[in-house]
Amino acid sequence: MTPFLQLTLTFSNEISFQSRNREISIWDSRNLSSSLNTISVDASSGTLMPLYDADTDMIFFAGKGDNTIKYCEITDKTPYLQENSVASTEQIKGAGLVPKLALDVMAGEVNRILILTKSNVLPTPYIVPRKVSADVMAGEVNRILILTKSNILPTPYIVPRKSYKEFHDDLFPETPCGEPALSCDDWFSGQNAQVQCTSLDPAKRKKRQAGTRTIGSKGDNQTNCISSTKEITKPKETSKSVIQETQDIPQTSKPEISGKDTSNAIPEQAMPNKGTTDKPTKESTGTPTKRSTDTPKEQSPSLTSANKPVTKVFTAVRQSKFKYLKGHTLHKSLHIDNIRKLYHGVPGESDMFYANQTRCVVPVEGAGGLLSVLEFNKPGRLADIGTPVLQHKSKATDYVWDPFNDNRLAVYPPDTGTPVLQHKSKATDYVWDPFNDNRLAVSCDDAKVWIWNIPEGGLTETVTEPSMYLRGHTEKLYFVRFHPLASDILVSSAYDFTVRIWDLNDGSEKLKLTTHPDQVFCVAWSPDGRYLATVCKDGRVRIFDPRQSPDAIKEGEGPDGSRGARVVWALNGKYLVITGFNKLCSRQLYIYDVDNLESPLYIHQLDFNPAVLVPYYDDDSHTLFVTGRGDGVVHSFEISTDHPHIFPLSPVHFEGLHQAISFLPKTCCDVKKVEFAKGWRLLNTTVEPVSFTLPRVKTEYFQDDVFPNTKVIDKPVMTSAEWFSGDNTPPRTVSLRPKDMKLLSEAPVEAPKEKKYESFNPDTYKTDEQKKEELLDAVTKKLEIKQSPLPQDLAEGVDDDEWGDD
């Protein structure tokens, strides 16, 4: 648009049928007596929001409350405004134009708009980062991103071209680079300067260095401000990712967490030589910290000639036995169907769905925190009607009078189809005792933990009184977790910011951790049962030795986001893996060395999704499974001591979206089918078994390279009294090998099949002439002329008198 043209979006003065029309007018600033052209849009009452791109003279406009986005092109000739396409969307609450440098020019993208709808889904994670990502090579000249209730819908505007292999400079003129041309002092002193521009051609454009500003002065003739930047400062988010390069650095020995009580805390890791490591400090991640040395930069050992330069080392594609794992749903005859009124409001600190070898627990709608217990040995369709029970201590959900007795009232729980566990308040989390398939611990928002004992064979009626209450917390509870090795030990956390450890033998509180200043997202026991790892809303990860001190023995920086996080121990307690969010609410995986929690070893970005990732780690295969509520895929990773420590495996896509997945002990797997993980998957109305297997050739052998001796997790190795007294007994292990299977490592090695022609073997190698002769011989045999007489030669003749005169 020329400097003399101005655009206004107003309402017309003419009122018809109690409404005013919205108009778009274009004016010449040299003559404002009348507009050059006026377009009537519609009669809506929402104020039009113009979004103008000076590079392409494209203008988008939409009104608050509208369901469409209109697009016009502005010219300096009549009619000045040319109406083009109209894009439909949801109800618009706001819109914004993405900066030009954030576009993907190599796909032809010349504009991108973010649309905010009435949904309260987080808009922040969907903001496009200010990095070079525009693709003009596909002719795309505009793109609109529409934020719906659960997705952002991109609407690209593409200019059709025959080829997109080259940069189309006619579509993409130089654009402002986002850097100031003057400082504030220069402008106040009366100086003027042109806006600095940069080319969008990827071949000519350099990546913008975050955190730098190139300020021109009077007389500057810079056309590409990005190329003239001098200072290079890494952005916080990039330095936080801790993507390290392979270097020649000495490996320091790291003491492992053993089962012996050698100290009260995990030993500190030896400080590496600053001259031989490139590990970022807390300063680079945005958190203030004290530098380990005050050596000036010019005197730093890393700059001396005695040290080796940092070089990249080529690494081949990583080979993994579990890379091509497969997941599938087992036969429908094992499913449990017709789950009615599944409750989706369970807090994010809970896994929502838990299963053991015998049964599972499912939340259902209704007052008092209803939990339905389903038996796996009773698959099929659940009953369509519920069991009537009297309710005395909670809100009635339905009721009916006895027609023959006016003084008798029957109160029904919600029609869930199965008997339920009835609580007096909302259930926030629940978990099965790993050593007792009949005991269930439930945390509620009444600050109590309910302990239930499920009768053999399952529930036959709705139950309202538990076998035990645990009282001690003063606020609503977050979650509960059982000890992995000692019986009758439970840990819980609540809104009073405390973590308490209980002895279920008498229901007493034994230990209390009061270090956390905010909500605790998750706790996880170490594999040896000595330590507790926690992730807090204050953005810190901590490790406790609860029997020695209520204070953390290790502490470091955790995920940035405050939406939620989970933590698991990996590689026999040497590493911590945390699933969380960054500041843009992108789901990420963080891996830490337990000897040094100052910063993560590596951060793997997964996707943009508001659901908290729930992890499950298999210590035998070093495989990590993660998924969230509403996902239809289970992501898998291999955890390794090799950098970058997190290696993606094949994701498993299931049919439909699930609410949660609960994995079973390793002893439940069918090793004859090379099944290394098994669990149950909760959908809206169904519970179905799922299996994770590996493709193998010799399945008749026991795959001892995949199935090492596994931990026995369904039998305790200590009592609660022994653990509280300080004992540390290592877990027992058991072999998964069936008696009728031989080991794969002992299978006879088959000789390789001999190829028909081997160039390295002179006995089997044949020249081209020999192959040609063989081919001709084969063709000749097929076309060989037979010496036998023809059929007509064998026919007998007739006498002359047999020929008639006719």
Image (tube, helix red, strand yellow):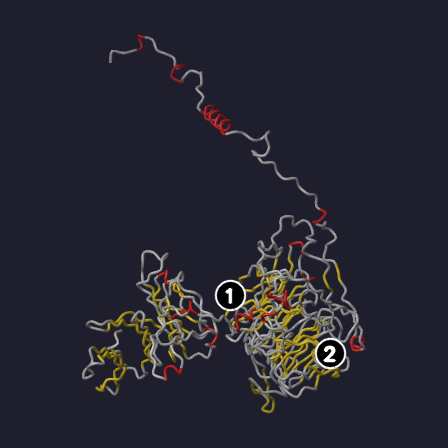
Up/down of 37 relative to 627, above or below: below
- Which of marks 2 and 1 precedes in the sequence? 2
Among the 4 quarters of the image, the one containing residue 483: bottom right
Residue 629, image x, y percentages: 55, 71
Residue 659 visible in the shown view: yes
The residue tagged 2 is: 546
* Residue found 58% across the figure and 53% down from its top: 316
Residue 656: mark in rendering: 1
Q: Dot 2, how many residues are within 10 Å of its Cα: few (below 14), some (14-19), or many (20+)? A: many
> Which amino acid, mark 2?
Pro
Q: Quadrant of the C terminus?
A: top left
61 sits to left or right of 636:
left
Q: Give percent across and percent down for residue 406.
A: 58, 91
Quarter of the image where the N terminus is located: bottom left
Disc 1 to disc 2, C-alpha distance:
42 Å
Residues packed near mark 1 inside 10 Å, few (<14), some (14 to 19) or many (20 plus): few
